[in-house]
Structure formats: C-alpha cells, structure tokens
Image (cartoon, rainbow, N blue to C red):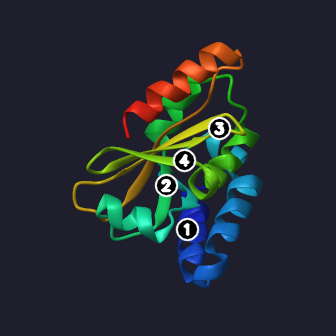
C-alpha cells in the first residue's frame, strides 16, 4: 500500500503542471478511502497554487496527508466522511486563504463549509495537510467560526 501511494505521488509530479490539480483530485477521490483504512506513509492530497507555495517558503506544491495526521483526523473529526477528503483541492483552489503563521495557511471554503490547514516543513521540502474539517452546520456558530478564522488574516 505504501509503495502504491509513493508511485501515485511520483506520477502526479510527472504530470504537466496544468493538469496536476485534476490528477491529484482524481487520486484523492479514487484511492484515498483504501489508504485511510490502514494509512502508511503519506498520501498526495492536493496541489498548492504557486502564490501560496511562495508565501509559505516551500520548495514543492504537493500537499500530503501523513498517516499520523490521518489517525488524529479520525479521532478529532469523525463526522468528516472519507469521501469528503477529495474536497481538499477545492479548498485550496476556491477557498479564502489566511496565512496564520510563517509556514502555515488556512483555506476557508465558505460555500462548501470546509477548512483545510496546510503547513510547510521547516526546510520547505514538504507540505502537509495538518487539519481538514467541516464548519458547523448551525448558521450562527458557523458565522462566528468564519469570523474567528478571518481575524487571523
């Protein structure tokens, strides 16, 4: 399984830049649930647009989800279905970006109600998804959460 995930990540990096996000979205949609059942290594989740790669000081645009973070996600956000993780690319493509630290950025997709947090490693050689969750379904609570996230900007 780890070898398959590494193969997919390597193949994504060989795809022309203009189709990388679509390729990553497809891999996340088709292979993620299988990986998430017994996560090993890290899974390619999304491609970070160039302006955010630069803002985070990263040397790569491939966002990965580590097995350790997946285990944390399953405990902290069991309400998020595995199929919803295919929306990570949408959060970075269409969401509002909020740089909350030098090497960390929050993406808020208000219309879908999702939040992705992406962090670059200290060396800049890797990008990781450190959190993915849904905003509250209660409108008032959801608006407070959006405002809290936007204050970080």
Would you name the residue on which mark 4 appears? 96
Residue at 61% in and 49% down:
91
**CB within 8 Å, label 1 to label 2:** yes
- Marks 4 and 3 sit apart, C-alpha to C-alpha, by 8 Å
Residue in front for this viewpoint, 57 or 146: 146
Circle 4 Cα neighbour tier, 10 Å, few/some/many (<14 / 14–19 / ≥20): some
Question: x, y (%) of residue 93?
Answer: 61, 58
Would you name the residue on which mark 1 appears? 9
Q: Secondary structure at mark 2?
A: strand
Would you name the residue on which mark 2 appears? 64
Please tell me which of labels 4 and 1 falls first in the chain.
Answer: 1
- Marks 4 and 1 sit apart, C-alpha to C-alpha, by 26 Å
Residue at 61% in and 55% down:
1
Quadrant assignment for the C terminus: top left
Residue in front for this viewpoint, 99 or 21: 99
- Marks 1 and 2 sit apart, C-alpha to C-alpha, by 9 Å
**Comparing labels 2 and 4, the label whose residue is closer to the camera:** 4
Please tell me which of labels 4 and 3 falls first in the chain.
Answer: 4
Question: x, y (%) of residue 147?
Answer: 50, 27
Would you name the residue on which mark 3 appears? 110
Please tell me which of labels 2 and 3 falls first in the chain.
Answer: 2
């Amino acid at each position: 399984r780890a070898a398959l995930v590494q193969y997919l990540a390597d193949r994504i990096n060989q795809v022309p830049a203009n189709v990388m996000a679509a390729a990553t979205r497809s891999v996340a949609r088709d292979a993620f649930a299988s990986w998430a059942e017994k996560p090993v290594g890290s899974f390619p989740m999304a491609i970070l647009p160039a302006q955010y790669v630069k803002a985070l000081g990263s040397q790569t645009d491939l966002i990965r989800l580590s097995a350790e973070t997946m285990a944390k996600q399953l405990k902290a956000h069991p309400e998020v279905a595995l199929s919803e993780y295919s929306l990570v690319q949408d959060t970075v493509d269409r969401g509002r970006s909020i740089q909350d630290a030098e090497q960390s950025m929050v993406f808020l997709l208000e219309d879908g109600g999702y939040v992705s947090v992406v962090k670059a490693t200290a060396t800049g050689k890797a990008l990781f998804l450190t959190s993915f969750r849904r905003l509250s379904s209660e409108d008032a609570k959801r608006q407070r959460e959006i405002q809290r996230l936007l204050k970080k900007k």
